[in-house]
Image: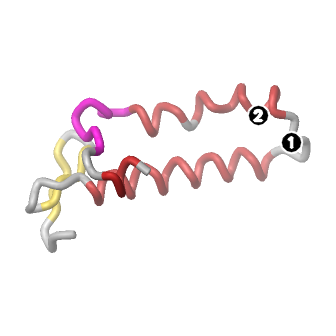
Amino acid sequence: MAGFSCSLLGVVVCADLSTTAHVADIVANAHKRANLILRAFVSRDINTLVRYLAYVRPLVEFNSIVWSPDTIKDIS
């Protein structure tokens, strides 16, 4: 990862024009929100938890056209 990064319209871009830092940030935020939802419920009923994907999905899909991952590391 390069030393300089800039955030434009919510997308973090490094000096080498890679979006690896942005992908890592998005994944971390999605994990945080998903873990908050899981900790809020005692039940692990999948039908109940699927309803709350609406709170995680927008984080992952926001500006996905702009930062579409192009490296195998970012895709996985």
Work out whether mark 1 precedes mark 2 in sequence or the reverse, and give the earlier one.
1
Q: CA distance from mark 1 to mark 2?
A: 7 Å
Q: In the visual, does 31 lie left or right of 28? A: right
The quarter holding residue 63 reads top left
Q: Identify the residue under disc 1.
A: 44
Q: In the visual, does 9 lie left or right of 58? A: left
Q: Position of residue 28 (x, y in %)?
A: 48, 57
Image quarter (top left, top right, bottom left or bottom right) of the N terminus: bottom left
| Residues at discs 1 and 2 in contact (Cβ within 8 Å) | yes
Q: Position of residue 29 (x, y in %)?
A: 49, 52
In this rendering, the answer to whether 75 lies above or below 64 is below
Which of the two residues, 46 or 51, is positioned nearer the viewer here? Answer: 46
| Image: magenta residue range | 62-69
Q: Identify the residue under disc 2.
A: 49
Q: In the visual, does 24 lie left or right of 39? A: left
Query: Which numbered circle lies on residue 57?
Result: none
Q: Position of residue 52 (x, y in %)?
A: 68, 31
Identify the secondary structure beneath mark 1: loop
In this rendering, the answer to whether 63 lies above or below 8 is above
The quarter holding residue 15 reads bottom left
Query: Mark 1: few, some, or many residues within 10 Å (few <14, many ≥20)?
Result: few
